[in-house]
Amino acid sequence: MSHTERLPRTRTYLMCPPEHFTVEYAINPWMDTTVPVDPALALKQWQLLKDTLTDLGHTVHVLEPRPDLPDMVYAANGAFSVDGKVYGARFAYPQRAAEAAAHRHFYVSGSWEFTDPEHVNEGEGDFAYLPGAYGGLILAGHGFRTEPVAHTEAQEVLGRPVISLQLVDPAYYHLDTALAALDDRNVTYFPEAFSPASQRVLAQLFPDAVIADRADAEAFGLNLVSDGRHVVLNTEATAMGEKVRAAGYTPVHVELGELKRGGGSVKCAVAELRP
Ligand code: ARG
């Protein structure tokens, strides 16, 4: 099968090093407080992910980690930006609440138009943006963290249509554990993580989507970062790598085993900045 050449677009990202990463509370099914994490290994793996993104030509900004916020490495949850506008996060669990202010500080110190949210939402964990789909489309997840009313709020703040999708499997509690943008107009997703109605919506909007299976989702293969050509995903997700390769993308695997102990992988650790 032949594909039109997949063209990368240079991106800007925000990441936060896991210097104080631990699993000391459990707010998703992947977190096990009885198994210690290896902080040095987590940091080494994170550095390699950052180097991979910069080697691909992207810019990575770094947020200062705070010792009292062990989940701060999952930088995707701190906000959601589209066209220079930023919709701030409001975390569902008190343990992570203070992360929102750290992200807010980053944006208000720059040339972003920042809006404080009224409703609970976990930033890019539950929001994805496809600039080339229907002139610019936001996909939004609810069911575990982000409240549906935050989808309406995001649409008003960002001025782009928001498609609400219901997540139904607690293992896939954020949209970015079950769906990812592969480029400006196409996605990959694990259908069973969504309600039957939301599966229909996705099938209607994205007839060419790359369909992932349960094993791909379990390996955090959907938790990927793509620049439109290079798809960065963790080493465990080998089958997912082959699926995106068959669709004409280039998989780039990185070892990120320690971050899975907190219930996240590549995408969770990377927020895209869209000026
Ligand atoms: N331990 C974090 C939490 O449960 C993991 C967040 C993962 N981030 C993501 N974008 N899916 O909140």
Image: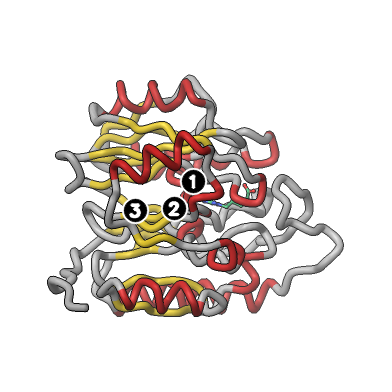
225 or 180, which is in the foreground? 180
The residue under the point 69% across, 40% down is 95
Q: CA distance from mark 2 to mark 1?
A: 6 Å
Label annotation for residue 72: none
Judge whether 75 appears above or below 141 on screen. below
> What amino acid type is highlighted by mark number 2?
Leu
Instruction: Identify residue type, mark 3.
Output: Glu
Q: At which x and y percent is residue 149?
A: 47, 21
Do tag 3 and tag 1 residues touch (Cβ < 8 Å)?
Answer: no
Q: Which residue is mark 3?
A: 272
Circle 1 packing at 10 Å, graded few (<14), some (14-19), many (20+), is many
**Tag 2's secondary structure?**
strand
* Numbered mark located on residue 175 in the image: 1
Residue 91 appears in the rendering: no
> Does residue 12 appear anywhere in the picture?
yes
Considering only order in the chain, which callout, 1 or 3, is on the residue closer to the N terminus? 1
Q: Nearer the viewer, mark 3 or mark 1?
A: 1
- Tell me which corner region of the image, top left, top right, bottom left or bottom right, holds residue 188: bottom left
What residue is pinned by disc 2?
Answer: 179
Rounded to the nearest whole Å, what is the CA distance between mark 3 and mark 2?
15 Å
Residue 151, how many percent across, how many down?
41, 27
Q: Residues within 10 Å of mark 2 (few under 14, many from 20)?
A: many
Q: Decide if ligand 1 comes within 8 Å of the CB at mark 1.
A: no
Label 3: few (<14), some (14–19) or many (≥20) C-alpha neighbours in 10 Å = many
Q: Is mark 2 within 8 Å of ligand 1?
A: no
Q: Quadrant of the N terminus?
A: bottom left
Tell me, yes or no, whether the two marked residues, 2 and 1, touch with CB atoms within 8 Å: yes
Q: Relative to 229, is 115 above or below? A: above
Q: Earlier in the sequence, mark 3 or mark 2?
A: 2
